[in-house]
Image (cartoon, coloured by chain):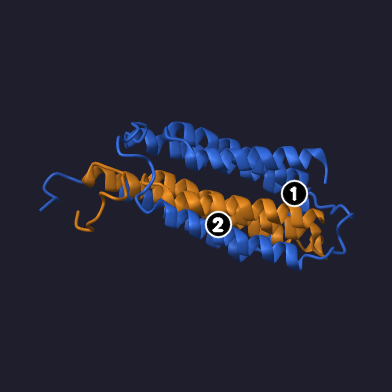
Amino acid sequence: MSIVFYLLAALTLVGGLASVTLKNTVHCALALTVAFAGLALLFLTLDAQFAGFAQILVYVGAVAILVVFAILLTRGHEIPIDGVFSRTWIVGLVIAAGVFAVLGWAVLASVHALPNELAVPVVTVHDIGNALVGHYVLPLEIVALLLTAATIGAVMVALHEKEGAKQ
Amino acid sequence: MTPLASYLLVAALLFSIGLAGALTRRNAILVLIGIELMLNAANLNLIAFWRYGPNPEALTGMMFAIFSIAVAAAEAAVGLGLVIAIYRSAHTTDLEQINRMKG
């Protein structure tokens, strides 16, 4: 594996770790953005240019901004006095460590070299567009419907409730 | 170690970090951040399998990852909208204080 992979993997993992451990939630959102950008660069090293740039547009561009908005709207940037971790944090940590042990064991025990380790796939954005409106047109339409419904749903849920609607 | 195994290990580690965050943090927004990290780790797996799999021209793994990104964006929008709605009625995002479903 090249040095680039190790650098990007370290960047992604440090960003991810920081985004769940830092005390200040605004710093968490910043670290989350670093992790998303690192993942997009990892996609690029895997010759998946379209997915990499979609990752940057959707996650670094939109989801990170949404998270910052939510943090500031809910005054989440004020650090609570009684700690940022739940009372049962040790259980969560044990479960996560167990899951990682199982996944790591499965990866190390089962992966053999696949036939395509060296050949670089030649896939252009043109091919992806053709596949999206050809073979995958039904999922594309369903995702469009889902995004519309999610937008309307998010607005409805977060709308101010009218006076008198209570009680 | 093969390249595929290294990518899968990174994804497994990222998934576990996200799971640990979702299970240990008190702030609802941080729990959502953990879930986003887990979804991203799954996307990395899909792309890695697409790249090193036997038939990358079929674009199956790539398409799965792209649709997964779209669905995760919808999930983030609805999740954060829910957090804001809960904050408006409960005046906190601390999950240990949100212990009733009545508004």
Q: Name the residue beneath numbered marker 2.
A: A97
Which sits in the foreground, B59 or A71?
A: A71
Give the mark nearest the N terminus, 2 or 1: 1
Distance Cα–Cα, label 2 vs label 1? 30 Å
Identify residue type, mark 1.
Ala
x then y, percent, for residue A54:
64, 45
Local packing at callout 1 (Cα closer than 10 Å; few below 14, some 14-19, many 20+) is many
2 or 1: mark nearer the eye:
2
Q: Which chain is orange?
A: B
Could you tell me the amino acid type at mark 2? Answer: Ala
Residue A46 shows up from this direction: yes
What residue occupies the far right of the structure in this picture?
A119
User: Above or below — where is A115 with respect to A36?
Assistant: below
User: Which of B72/A145 is in front?
Assistant: B72
Residue A84 in which image quadrant = top left
Q: Which mark is residue A48?
A: 1
**Residue at left offset 48%, top offset 53%:** A93
Examine the image and state in which quarter residue A12 appears.
top right
Which residue is located at x 87 percent, y 64 percent?
Answer: A115
* Residue A135 in the image, given as x and y percentages of width and height: 70, 65
Q: Residue at x 62, y 44 (%)?
A: A55
Q: Residue at x 58, y 54 (%)?
A: B15
Q: Callout 2: residue from which chain?
A: A
Give the chain letter for blue: A
B77, B26: nearer the viewer: B26
- Of all residues, the one furthest to the bottom in this rendering is A110
